Amino acid sequence: MSDIKVHPVPDDFAANALIDTAQYDSMYRRSIEDPEGFWSEQAEQFLTWFKPWDKVLEWDYHQAHIRWFEGGRLNACYNCLDRHLDSRGNQTALIWEGDDPAMDKTLSYRELHTAVCRFANALKSRGVKKGDRVCIYMPMIPEACIAMLACARIGAVHSVVFGGFSPESLKDRILDSDCRVVVTADEGVRGGRHVPLKANADKALNACPDVHTVFTVKRTGGNVDWHPERDVWYHEEVAEASADCPAEEMDAEDPLFILYTSGSTGKPKGVLHTTGGYLLYCAITHKYTFDYHDGDIYWCTADVGWITGHSYIVYGPLANGAISLVFEGVPTWPDASRFWQVVDKHRVNTFYTAPTAIRALMREGEAPVQATERSSLKLLGTVGEPINPEAWEWYYNVVGDGRCPIVDTWWQTETGGHMITSLPGAIPMKPGSATRPFFGVVPGIVDNEGKLLEGECEGSLVITRPWPGQMRTVYGDHQRFIDTYFKAFPGYYFSGDGARRDADGDYWITGRVDDVLNVSGHRLGTAEVESALVLHKAVAEAAVVGYPHDVKGQGIYAYVTLVKDIEPSDELRQELVDLVREEIGPIAKPDVIQWAPALPKTRSGKIMRRILRKIAANELDTLGDTSTLADPGVVDELTANRANQ
Ligand code: ATP
Ligand code: MG
């Protein structure tokens, strides 16, 4: 992009930061030169082990064989709760903010510990043992976190399925990981509307004969069907259960959970994470990326149904004894000030959200933000998609009043935790760039032949050696793990994303490699063209894909969502084309602009370019798996109004 802005680390933030530039450099160097020494020290510092490991690391990327701290024994729940009881038993662990602004509650570490032990015993009493899989299909209520931790406590493997998924998607996930127990709620509440979770689960379970127990949390008291041979009320079971439940001693490489990816690119994969490496990696990244100081109020707006919720609502923060806010609602209800009202109400210091939420709020203008104080905020974060520099600046200047550093964290379900991100006290920010690798992470950029490129370059983003938070397999299909991540560029982990490294050594994620455009032989990232389009003040959001073009090989097809109350026009269309030409060059100017009232998104809010590509190419009968779409109606609308080329 034409002029890259660099925001230095704010002085007063740096003065208090856990890691400054010199420390980042020396710790990073050590983590690369002596990874085993570095990670052993971190594992001792961040976690409590029942027994030390025999071997720090064993790996072979050709077989996709990755083992960290094997022989070491620990329990993730013990690390998140028990060991904090003496020092901070009465400190708040979770702040719950309900969908209804009048509803909230807090749970101290001791209260959370008791609740987890009781539910762990309830699971045991229904026959759940170490290694069994348990499906958690829940709204954002404390019981979702309690259920995860209870599984971890007894060595059961949880598979959390986002509460917005349909019965069909839930069924697929239950069957794929062979869960025999499901934990759900009567209904969820989001944006004032009730979501029939128990009814959805009932539907899914028609096709899952092996599920013998469904625990249902009473959230709303709404009507539910009851299957007495299978269904039990959560509150009744925990009331009878003892609060004494010793934590199971697990091997560092015992599975902790399975989590299905969000499905932007195709059929979701059952990503398997294990205990020791994963927990260490989310604890250390949570502490340093968010510069977490004792007592900070930390809020990650993700759902526990996604990896961001696993690593940065539950495991990372609790392992660090942090105060973690769990939000049941949505950013725009009762109105577009909600996030900032919650920030003011609970005096939130660190706020972590996704570009999709930022863009949605930007669409509403500055007034809803300015109606609030936000004086408690110290740090902002983003994850999930490339953030357009325009949205970055809005987040920085309007939400953060230009005071709070932003950490743009690039990572994946597969990576367990942050991989490329600025550390707020150490690394200057560049809007749109995730900047530098985290400790122990060695990224590489390869060309199509798999050759590592040097210096300033662009290509496919790989990671050249293991880090503790790396996934260990695709559940039940190790070959798929090898094929998806280790085949394209032998010897490396292939992320599926493209990236550019600039002259300073900072990384810019250009989008998924499948989405990279090739126009007349020039490679262009979708993120770059989209960022140019949203510079226009009439544009709220844009998604760009390639389509077959007789002359150029690929043409550029842009779907553009306008800001509230702006009408499309040919004049505006021309302005947008001119803007892209000016910002990037004539090669990048869109051939087609289709006005899109809304874009198809996954349930985690990511734009699904795979489907937009099909519409652009007019391949309407092969749209592929749409079960992970948040609102399939959006696709019908786009198809019906497909631009004439
Ligand atoms: P699937 O793998 O099923 O297609 P998914 O990739 O959307 O789904 P996730 O693991 O939730 O599932 O998302 C990881 C992806 O999100 C990354 O590979 C990248 O494309 C994108 N991403 C995440 N954070 C960032 C970021 N800070 N900047 C740019 N892209 C990001
Ligand atoms: Mg992915």
Image (spheres, rainbow, N blue to C red):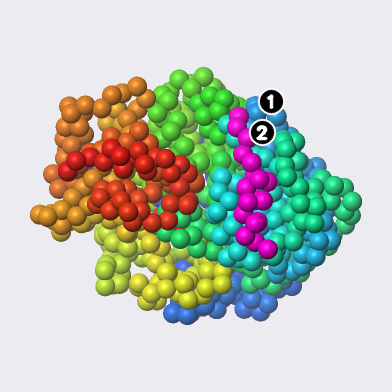
The location of residue 467, given as percent across then percent down, is: 51, 67
Locate the C terminus and report the quarter of the image it occupies.
top left
The location of residue 624, given as percent across then percent down, is: 38, 56
What amino acid is labelled 2 in the image?
Gly
* Magenta-highlighted residues: 192-209
Q: Residue at x 29, y 61 (%)?
A: 459
Mark 1–mark 2 Cα distance, whole angstroms, equals 7 Å
Locate the N terminus and report the quarter of the image it occupies.
top left
Residue 564 lies, with reference to residue 253, above or below; the image says above
Between residues 21 and 47, which one lies in front from this camera angle?
Answer: 47
What amino acid is labelled 1 in the image?
Ala
* Disc 1 residue lies near ligand 1 with CB under 8 A: no
Between residues 409 and 98, which one lies in front from this camera angle?
Answer: 98
Residue 267 shows in the view: yes
Kindly state the secondary structure of the residue where label 2 is placed: loop
Instruction: Find disc 2 in the rendering and name its residue.
Output: 98
Instruction: Find disc 1 in the rendering and name its residue.
Output: 102
Image check: 622 left or right of 593? right
Give neighbour class at mark 2: few <14, some 14-19, many 20+ (Cα, 10 Å).
Answer: some
